[in-house]
Amino acid sequence: MTSTTMRLAPSLARRQGLTLLALLPGVLVLLMQQGRPALINLLLALYSSLLTDMTCQASRKQPLATSWRQPDCLLTGLMLALMLPMATPAGLLLAACMMAVLWRHLFGGTAHGPFHPVLVSLLMLSPWLASPLPAQNIALSLALLAGGVWLLWRRLNAWQVPAGFCLVLLVSLPLGTGWLLLQPALWLLLGWVMTDGNSTPITPRGRLIHGQAAGLLCVSFAALTHKADITPLLAAILLLMSAAAPLVDQLLQPRQRT
């Protein structure tokens, strides 16, 4: 019997492949800036994510080819490699990728589960990071922004969540929050995590409110960080918003007249 995931494989694989391709500008910028350390981190992240996913597929008696035909595990590893600092120990990087992939399989694989695996892994391992997460990087931020805009242009992501978040951020610029625009993790989470339909409201209005609420929380707490990196904080905010997504959908349902 063919599973639902396998029946949807062609379209799902194409979507994931294009989402992975949108990260290419950011990867190239990181390689030009960091060189060999960045290459090693990228290879470790991709290898560990793929190996963990293949192991999980085997335990579920699914074809091993699913791991690269639907490259969700590669996308997970690549995102973590872009967000974690170059000084991250290899063991910690491997643990982060393995934890993210295992979390996804714990809830049944791709497009299942209440929280994005990258957020869960990043938040759980952030206390053990050897150094602060990468903060301001103009070139990398622009590369990730370009990739996110391309995803929106291809209609692979819903625009309401990033639009709501960016609207709040732009309104708050007079308050001195412009430094947030230079943090690559913000654009990475905004373009590849916040647009994940499995952890956001299902209605367009709900997604817009979701993005605005996340933006308000981010701007409010960022005022207390003294321009430090806010990646763990933003991950916690997005996990909180993901948990609230069903409530937002319920509140926005039209009331039936009696």
Image (cartoon, rainbow, N blue to C red):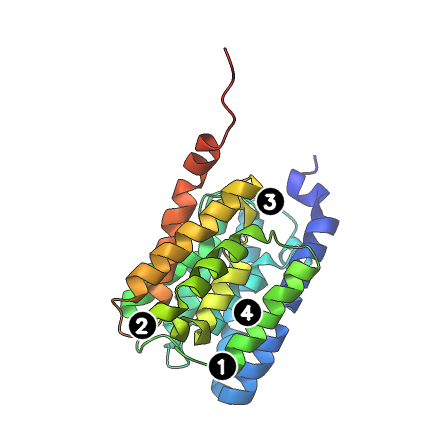
Identify the amino acid type marked 4: Leu
Residue bearing mark 3: 61
* Residue found at x 54% / y 60%: 192
Camera-side mark, 2 or 1: 1
| Distance CA(mark 2)–CA(mark 4) | 19 Å
**Residue 15 visible, this orientation:** yes
Identify the amino acid type marked 1: Ile
**Residue 120 visible, this orientation:** no
Camera-side mark, 2 or 4: 2
Q: Quadrant of residue 17?
A: bottom right
Residue bearing mark 1: 138
Q: Position of residue 205 (x, y in %)?
A: 53, 42
First along the sequence among labels 2 and 1: 2
First along the sequence among labels 3 and 2: 3
> 137 above or below 55?
below
Q: Position of residue 105 (x, y in %)?
A: 50, 48
Secondary structure state at the residue bearing disc 2: loop
Residue bearing mark 4: 46
Camera-side mark, 1 or 4: 1
Left of 67 or right of it: where is 234? left
First along the sequence among labels 1 and 3: 3
| Distance CA(mark 2)–CA(mark 1) | 23 Å
